[in-house]
Amino acid sequence: MAGVLHLKMRLNNSILTTVDDPTSSTHGPSDLQRYKLASNNVCVRCVSSLSAEEICHWRELASCSIEPNPFLSPNFILPLLQEIPPLAPVQMMVVTDSETGEWRAAGLFETPQPTLKRPLSYAHGLTSPYTFLTGILVDSCSAQATLDATFAHCGRSRDWHGLHFDSLRADSAFVAAMHQAAALTGTQVAEVYRWSRSQFVCDGPHTIDQVLEKCSRSRRKSLNHARRQLEKQGHVEYRLVIPSHANHECIRTFLELEHSGWKGEAGTAFLSAASTTRFFLGMAESMTADKGLVFGELLLNGEVISSTCNLLTSDVLTAFKIGWNPAFADYAPGLWSEVYLASTVSRELPHITRIDSSAKSGSYVEAVWKTQQPMISVTYSWSRRGQTIESLRSYYRSVKNWLEVAKIPSSYKASP
């Protein structure tokens, strides 16, 4: 079985990597790892026990993380845990500088009970219906050393067999640093799933026509037709709004538009439940204080008919939610909102480098934002039992994918 643990395998969408490194936690930490551990304190905390000063450290870390992620900011997490707490217990791993006490890394994890399908205890990066990117906040100035120390510490832990993240940007500097830290400590990396997500790269000012150039000819034709039909109804304009307080009119307008459409009918709009309303308003109050909310509004004769809510972190704008007046559905307000957002942000907010759609594969936004961002779901295992089970799981996924590609008759397929 030891031979199974030390291999590199790529079959279809399953990737499994284990590095037999002499500095692996199995062999004990190296002198370099001891130094990194000595210069960093790693501990697990309860979010509710954090002081105001510690929350300030957390907020500062979120603003300088190697991977900008609004879904790990205290402005997002604290209202989420208060109003929509997950079923599994949530713990916070914090890495601080031993001398200054400054936060170097912070990650929030759910710790679900082991099941027959997942018999070992893993820490799962916190997810929710409103979380579209998981991971860990890591200070960009000391990212690699911090993650090396984190993995070295975790490798000696008996509480968890590894970490699992549902949604990471595959080609990000954060994932590269995580994989390097895993290699240093003999931690196994198993890629569970891979997909693509649309994004808009702001590589300079873009006019509306320049955004549309990347669309198919038929899409450009249908969008321009919809725009001409809308202009027959009156004056069309678009604007960005960065609210300075939680009672700003643009926030109420967005909530009403989101609730007026299919989300309201399905009961998934923020106004559909008191808890989700409180979550959004609490998040909005925290984020507006840091200028972290950006609304894009499409107007007809001065009335907002479509609104997008976007989260601003460092040089990345993350699309969060959209709402539009269903009475104007024939004029493609959703697609035009995304086109206008890309063009206006690239011209009016030049420090933004990209807009993350937060969308699933096959989303409508792919029709106008053509650049694809590779995404992965990944598991890091440091215990021998965890590595063994993940090796078997990866092998099973590879065989299953091969059978699906080969279209083997179902009667010959192995049962799950």
Image (cartoon, helix red, strand yellow):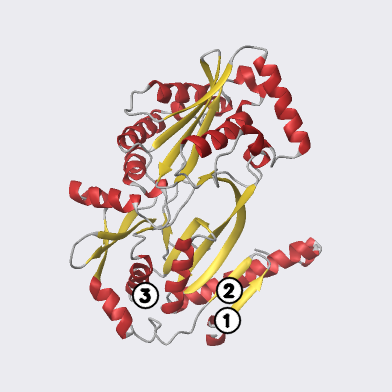
- Image location of residue 134, percent across then percent down: 45, 53
Which residue is found at the position 34% from the left and 33% from the top? 288
Asked whether, in this view, residue 362 is left or right of residue 21, the answer is right
- Among the two numbered marks 3 and 1 on one chain, the one whose residue lies closer to the N terminus: 1
**Quarter occupied by the N terminus:** bottom right
Q: At 63% from the left edge and 49% from the top edge, which residue is drawn?
A: 371
Nearer mark to the viewer, of 2 and 1? 1
**Would you name the residue on which mark 3 appears?**
155
Image quadrant holding the C terminus, namely: bottom right
Work out whether mark 3 precedes mark 2 in sequence or the reverse, and give the earlier one. Answer: 3
Q: Which amino acid does label 3 sit on?
A: Gly
User: What is the three-letter code of the residue carrying label 2?
Assistant: Leu
Q: Nearer the viewer, residue 2 or 243?
A: 243
Which type of secondary structure does the marked residue at label 3 adopt? Answer: helix
Say which element carries label 2: helix
Q: What residue type is labelled 1?
A: Leu
293 or 352: nearer the eye? 352
Cα–Cα gap, marks 2 and 1: 12 Å
Quote the CA–CA distance across marks 3 and 1. 19 Å
Q: Which of 29 and 301 is in front in this view?
A: 301
- Return the x and y of residue 149 as percentages of the image width and height: 33, 72
- The reply to whether residue 410 is in sight is yes
Mark 2 or mark 1: which comes first in sequence?
Answer: 1
Indicate which label's residue lies in the foreground, 3 or 2.
3
Is residue 295 found left or right of 101 in the rendered image? right
The residue where tag 1 is placed is: 7
Q: Position of residue 73 (x, y in %)?
A: 35, 47
Q: How crowded is mark 3: few (under 14 residues within 10 Å), some or many (20 or more)?
A: many
Tell me if residue 100 comes above or below residue 200 in the rendering. Answer: below
